[in-house]
Each structure stands twice: as structure tokens, then as C-alpha cells.
Amino acid sequence: MQALDLPPFDYKIRQNSANIPEIWDELRRKYVVLTPEEWVRQHVAQYLMTHLGYPRGLLSLERGHRYNQRQKRTDLVALGPDGRPLLLVECKRPSVAITPAVAQQVATYNQTMRAPFLLLSNGLVHYCWRVDFERGVNERLADIPTYAEASAS
């Protein structure tokens, strides 16, 4: 898999019975098919836990939610101490450019989730925003906030 602009972590990869590579997902506690997007998702999840202090028990991968009568899935959601969405993460494979249309996708998901922070990553490029729902504006952040920083906002 491609080297990413995220710190490496200890991962477990195996081949399943159909000879398809799988990676151990610590959050879901099972092996999942290792796609390029999954490679990014696993790196982002590990970075949030290991380097930014997001509690493992408050991270949820591929959480379902409804938007416009349709069932959607978010790549990763970090919950705050109150159990509400704190950080909504959308991961793309490294070959997918982070465009305004991709950013609009995560913003659209967030209309129902209402997380105060959004993170968009293809593993090589990362964009993070603080969402002010009252004023209807998004503020681009230079860095991804730590769990303590995000929780205090």
C-alpha cells in the first residue's frame, strides 16, 4: 500500500480465503478488506488515538445516519464526552483529489450529524474545519485539534 503523510503504526495484514488482503481493524475488532480508502481510514483512526488523544471507545467507524430519507455512512466519527458527534471524518483513497465537491460531501453529511469539527483526508492531504452552526460559517484550521482541544470548544 502507498506511503501516507501520517505516522506509521503497527498493523496486521493477512490474506483471506479468496486471497484478498485484509487489515485488522482495532475499532471494529475484526479483519476488513484492505482497500486504498481503508488504508487511509486505518491510518487516520490510529493517528487520532495515538497522537491526538481521541479515546478508542469514542470512535466509531462507518456509522450509519439518515440524510434526506437515505441511509448514509460516515467513515469515522469521534464522539465528545457528552456522546454527541465531535469530529466527522471523511476518508478518500490517495488517488482521489480533495476538491470542493468532496468537501461538500462531508459538509452535507454534517447537516444531520452536527459535529463542530470536520476532517477530510486522502492520506496525503488533510483539511480540517471548525463549524459554527449559529453563524453558518466554516473556519479552516491549520491543524487537527487534539481531543482535549476539540472537547473544550
Image (spheres, rainbow, N blue to C red):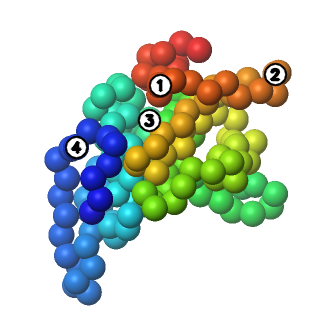
Q: Position of residue 111 (x, y in %)?
A: 75, 42
Q: Secondary structure at mark 4?
A: loop
Report, in whole angstroms, how far the alpha carbon at label 3 lies from the one at label 2.
Answer: 25 Å
Report which residue position mark 4 lands on.
8
Q: Amino acid at mark 3?
A: Leu
Q: Is residue 86 above or below residue 126?
A: above
Report, in whole angstroms, how far the alpha carbon at label 1 lies from the one at label 3.
Answer: 20 Å
Residue drawn at 55 percent across, 33 percent down = 128
Q: Residues within 10 Å of mark 1 (few under 14, many from 20)?
A: few
Are the residues tagged 2 and 1 within 8 Å (C-beta)?
A: no
Q: Which mark is residue 134?
A: 2
Q: Is residue 16 above or below residue 119?
A: below
Q: Position of residue 36 (x, y in %)?
A: 38, 64
Q: Earlier in the sequence, mark 4 or mark 2?
A: 4
Q: Earlier in the sequence, mark 2 or mark 1?
A: 2
Quadrant for the C terminus in the image: top right
Report which residue position mark 1 lands on.
143
Q: Looking at the image, which residue sits at the far top?
A: 152
Q: Amino acid at mark 4?
A: Pro
Q: Closer to the camera: disc 3 or disc 2?
A: 2
Q: Position of residue 73 (x, y in %)?
A: 59, 57
In the displayed structure image, the side of residue 125 where residue 72 appears, left or right: right
Report, in whole angstroms, how far the alpha carbon at label 4 lies from the one at label 3.
Answer: 22 Å
Quadrant for the N terminus in the image: bottom left
Q: Earlier in the sequence, mark 1 or mark 3?
A: 3
Q: Closer to the camera: disc 2 or disc 1?
A: 1
Q: Which mark is residue 58?
A: 3
In the displayed structure image, the side of residue 40 where residue 74 appears, left or right: right
Report, in whole angstroms, how far the alpha carbon at label 4 lies from the one at label 2.
Answer: 38 Å
